Amino acid sequence: MTDYRVPLYRPSLRGNEAQYVLECLETSWISARGRFVAEFESQFAPKVGARHGLATCNGTAALHLAVAGLGLGPGDEVIVPTLTYVACANAVAYTGAVPVFADCAADSWQIDPQEIRSSITPRTKAIMAVHLYGQPCELDPILELAQRHKLFVIEDCAEAFGAFYKGRPMGAFGDVAAFSFFGNKTITTGEGGMIVSNDVECRGCDRTGAARARRRARASETGTGAKIF
Ligand SMILES: Cc1ncc(COP(=O)(O)O)c(C=O)c1O
């Protein structure tokens, strides 16, 4: 029998990657700025239907920035799915807000809108809709619930770049969305993330807003030393 292995992930790096990395080394733009970061932000956001994008050091920092950018903190609750990556709950907890777990549907493995409904309390401020394994959540009922209860919707699109819901790309349905570009994601920067939004001022998606959100995040920080961008 042949020993055939299907890799969990294997990024394809056979384009211009090596040339661009060399350009970074030659120009010494190797950290958070430089032409590639700005180009990536401005080209990525429209691909997912958003007006603004801000690159971050990873997807966890993007989620953290999303929660902090919405001004959430102690006394607030954010509904997150039970089946997800740990960063979702952590990003909420980093700000001092409380992650409240809503169960997932047995057929889709995505957060169940019925469970969201029964998890809403007077402290609930946001719903984190995680499109796990590239499969969109049932967004229509989630957006309706959010509108009815005046809640923010944070989309976690870490695993969903390239996925569509009713013909629209994931990332611009809610108030803010976070992406990850870790090596096992649809596209990769090695480590990296992006926060996108259509609202430049309040959602921490320009550098001033992000700096404000970062200050807020730092003030309530409980465990992360991440440089957000
Ligand atoms: C659903 C989900 N959210 C958030 C993250 C966090 O992204 P990162 O690993 O870039 O911090 C991941 C990464 O695996 C993820 O799968």
Image (cartoon, helix red, strand yellow):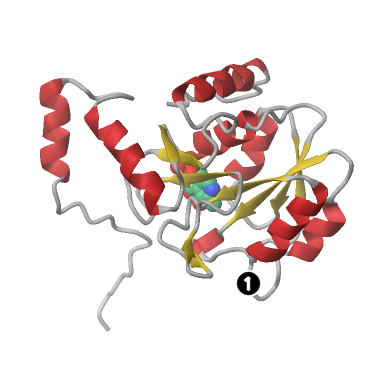
Give x and y (percent) for residue 156.
56, 49
Say which of 136 and 39 sits in front.
Answer: 39
For disc 1, the neighbor class at 10 Å (few under 14, some 14 to 19, many from 20) is few
In the picture shown, does residue 109 fall above or below 193?
A: below
Give x and y (percent) for residue 11.
28, 55
Q: Residue pushed farthest right?
A: 122
Q: Quadrant of residue 8?
A: bottom left
In the picture shown, does residue 177 fall above or below 94?
A: below
Q: Is residue 167 left or right of residue 118?
A: left
Q: Quadrant of residue 152?
A: top right
Q: Is residue 145 left or right of residue 90?
A: right
**The residue carrying mark 1 has its beta carbon less than 8 Å from ligand 1:** no
Give x and y (percent) for residue 157.
51, 52
The quadrant the N terminus occupies is bottom left
Q: Secondary structure at mark 1?
A: loop
Q: Residue at x 32, y 48 (%)?
A: 188
Q: Is residue 16 left or right of residue 122?
A: left
Visible in this render: residue 8? yes
The quadrant the C terminus occupies is top left
Visible in this render: residue 225? no
Q: Is residue 154 left or right of residue 44?
A: right
Q: In the image, what residue type sits under mark 1?
A: Ser
Say which of 162 and 25 sits in front.
Answer: 162
Q: Residue at x 51, y 62 (%)?
A: 133
In the picture shown, does residue 105 fall above or below 39?
A: below
Say which of 223 and 101 sits in front.
Answer: 101
Q: Quadrant of residue 204?
A: top right
In the picture shown, does residue 213 fall above or below 203?
A: above
Give x and y (percent) for residue 49.
45, 52
Figure label count:
1
Q: Which residue is denoted by mark 1 in the rendering?
A: 108
